[in-house]
Amino acid sequence: MNKEKGCVLAIFGATGDLTHKKLLPALYFLELEKQLDEGFTIVAVARRPRTTEEFRKEAAASIQKFSKYKPREDILSRLLQRIHYHQLEFNQQQDYTNLRKRISELTTRRCRQIFYLAVPPEHFEGIVQNMEAAKLADKGNKDVRIVFEKPFGNNLRSAQELNKTIRKVFDESQIYRIDHYLAKELVQSLLVLRFGNSIFEPLWNNKYIEHVQITVAESIGIEGRAGYYEKAGALKDIVQNHIMQLLSLVAMQAPKKLTADDIRDEKVKVLQKLSIRNIAQDGVKGQYGNGKEAVAYREEKNVPPDSKTDTYFALKVFVNNATWNSVPFYIRTGKRLKERATEIILVYKPSIIRLFPEVQDGEKLNRLTVRVQPDEGISLTFNTKVPGNKILIEPVTMDFCHECTFGPKSAEAYERLLYDIIQGDQTLFTRWDEVELSWKLVDRIAAAFKDKAPAMYPAGSWGPKEADMLIERDGRKWVVPEKPRYAQMQVNHEGH
Ligand code: BG6
């Protein structure tokens, strides 16, 4: 980082959950790793009355509670010294003028300014307009950056309106739209896996790949967020952003260079060609009912007893280009599923040499699994001969365990995101055209399923039967996420 320039990070929504659970612990690690320069100042902006001292105490408690490792006192106190609290009503123009004064008092010279909106999306437009009126925004100046947490809009129209307002005040080059899945270590390593390995790159297309599965399974429920979730549901909460991003990284062509725009140009080309053939048949909307250890969604606090909101969605989609024509991408996500697991699975076509008829389909097809979380790693499943006189064939799995090789210290998503924002690297942030294209498709799906009753599944299961049928109709099966062998071994070691 340029030591001359220092930097201001103003976090709107500083008393909220995201700041305390993610942003402050991430800032602590940036401090630990000496990534924050001397002049780096954090202005915690929120509506509640607090003194800086009070806020620092709360921040310390959150960092202690939510950090991966026990924080070091010296590092923690260095970070806390950087933090200043500023009370602001989101709709009070004068408060923004005061914020500008406060920032100039806290920083001795002109420096990069980052405004991080960790607030509910209904405040985005108002904040941006007030920032402009108070001359906090500086259109076209890449050293003034604005960060938006998701969701970016609730449908295509609201996203377009929001974007229009923002673009009056900021250029695209100043805007950082968060999709924290892009900063997960194994998602970032997709490009290397694909384009840095001659054993994979030539096989990454419809000549060799039979189908692709992307699963984002969560074991948690809605965690008290009924207000938000009732308006979103699984389709808008996870498919529109995280899954669309995973899919575009899997299906994109090699970018010309590793620049933010070259990479995003290629992802956009995928989204332009993404289609669902028969919405009614190729989608399943689900909702969890009572399970052994959890209550039904409709019994969660503040959820209406007749809610039709999707807590699960499965889809079959296609990328209609020469590389992927005819390869179905089966995608699914859900809350209160059996386990937390995010996996990308490529299932390969059978060999054209048909010497072994038993390896032509089902579980004996070769598979490449990218395990995004937990127990990050990559596994290759292929067939081998079982020892003995006869030729018996069994699939075996070769694993790369990320943590076993690189240790447990890979950066948390928010650490990486904050680092990149400070550096001014937009690669891991979604550009407007990506957001717009994914909303276009999601809007069509949402409209088709709006009044449809959800298919029910017991909390703690792998989702509704209808989702199994979606893929089984095509003679395929969902690959059930399993704890990789290396993770099972770790558990055993720890158990002894
Ligand atoms: C968020 C969603 O974007 O991602 C949440 O709003 C979800 O509903 C979360 O729980 C999952 O993120 P992660 O990193 O825990 O997989």
Image (cartoon, rainbow, N blue to C red):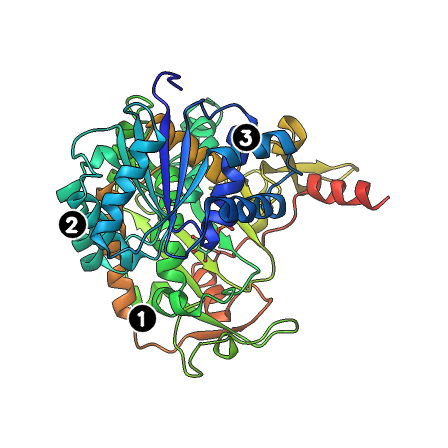
Residue type highlighted by circle 3: Arg
- Mark pair 2, 1: CA separation: 30 Å
Residue designated by label 1: 449
Image x and y of residue 327, in percent: 36, 46
Image x and y of residue 44, in percent: 41, 44
Whether ligand 1 has any atom under 8 Å from the Cβ at mark 3 is answered as no
The one nearer the camera, 173 or 256, is 173
In this picture, residue 80 sits left or right of residue 86: right
Q: Image quadrant of residue 387?
A: top right
Disc 3: CA contacts within 10 A as few (<14), some (14-19) or many (>=20): few
Residue type highlighted by circle 1: Phe
Whether ligand 1 has any atom under 8 Å from the Cβ at mark 2 is answered as no
- Is residue 67 in view from this perspective? yes
Under circle 2, the secondary element is helix
Residue designated by label 2: 165
Query: Along the polypeptide, which appears first: circle 2 or circle 1?
Result: 2
In this picture, residue 126 sits left or right of residue 65: left
Where residue 78 is drawn, which disc sits there? 3
